[in-house]
Image (cartoon, rainbow, N blue to C red):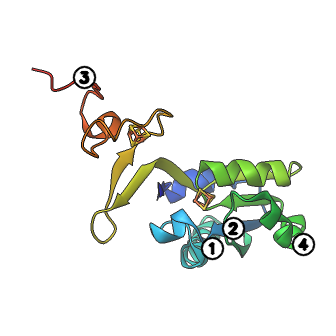
């Protein structure tokens, strides 16, 4: 799955200085599974943004909306009404979902709330290991099922280095 981690709240607040009405769009796909981008995280982020803005002396109206997968264009019109009410959209998907949202709603400013980091696998609660660098030329049949691109520190394909 695609693994992504939350951006610092301060980074999002800096983007929201002029905004009065934001919509946080979560994704029930990969980022929900890695506990950074699902509906629960959207609710939590909405509360933290509202409190932080209030402490800074301004108000931010924040709604949330959830998509099954933000990377599927045919699912995006379902939130059109809520997008229309917002002056900024905050995406809790990976970079693919952020770009789909931007294409679907070109008149809105889209802020990515996550940093997409790698394609990985579960390695314990809240822990994900990088397992694929999306190289486009898979050689796992030659390497005993171990990805040399992500699991060799130098990304070597031709055996161990010194
Ligand atoms: S938008 Fe990204 S995080 Fe959401 S399902 Fe698609 S690939 Fe996974
Ligand atoms: S070799 Fe590694 S990086 Fe390339 S496709 Fe296969 S698993 Fe992914």
Find disc 1 in the rendering and name its residue.
Answer: 46
Quadrant of residue 49 within the rendered picture? bottom right
Find disc 3 in the rendering and name its residue.
Answer: 158
Work out whether mark 4 precedes mark 2 in sequence or the reverse, and give the earlier one. 2
Quadrant of residue 73 within the rendered picture? bottom right
Position of 82 compared to 44: left or right?
A: right
Q: Quadrant of the C terminus?
A: top left
**136 vs 31: above or below:** above
Which quadrant of the picture is home to ligand 2?
A: top left
Position of 39 compared to 144: left or right?
A: right
Q: Which residue lies furthest to the left in this view?
A: 162
Measured Cα–Cα span from mark 4 to mark 2: 13 Å
Measured Cα–Cα span from mark 1 to mark 2: 7 Å
Find disc 2 in the rendering and name its residue.
Answer: 24
Q: How many residues crowd mark 1 within 10 Å: few (<14), some (14–19), many (20+)?
A: many
Measured Cα–Cα span from mark 3 to mark 1: 48 Å
Circle 1 or circle 2, nearest the eye: 2
Query: Helix, strand or loop at disc 4?
Result: helix
Query: Helix, strand or loop at disc 3?
Result: loop
The total number of labels drawn is 4
Residue in the picture at 64% in, 49% down:
96
Residue in the picture at 31% in, 41% down:
147
Find disc 4 in the rendering and name its residue.
Answer: 81
Position of 110 compared to 40: left or right?
A: right
Circle 3 or circle 4, nearest the eye: 3
Q: Which of 21 and 18 is in front in this view?
A: 21
Position of 66 compared to 121: left or right?
A: right
């Amino acid at each position: 799955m695609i693994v992504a981690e939350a951006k610092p709240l301060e980074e999002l607040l800096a983007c929201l200085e002029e905004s009065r009405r934001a919509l946080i769009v979560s994704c029930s796909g990969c980022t929900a599974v890695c506990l950074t981008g699902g509906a629960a995280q959207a609710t939590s982020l909405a509360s933290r943004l509202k409190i932080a803005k209030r402490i800074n002396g301004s108000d931010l109206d924040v709604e949330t909306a959830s998509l099954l997968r933000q990377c599927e264009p045919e699912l995006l019109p379902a939130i059109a009404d809520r997008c229309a009410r917002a002056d900024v959209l905050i995406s809790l998907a990976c970079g693919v979902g952020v770009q789909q949202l931007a294409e679907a709603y070109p008149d809105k400013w889209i802020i990515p709330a996550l940093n997409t980091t790698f394609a990985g696998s579960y390695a314990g609660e809240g822990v994900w290991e990088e397992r694929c660098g999306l190289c486009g030329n898979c050689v796992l049949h030659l390497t005993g099922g171990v990805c040399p691109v992500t699991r060799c520190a130098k990304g070597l394909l031709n055996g161990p280095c010194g």
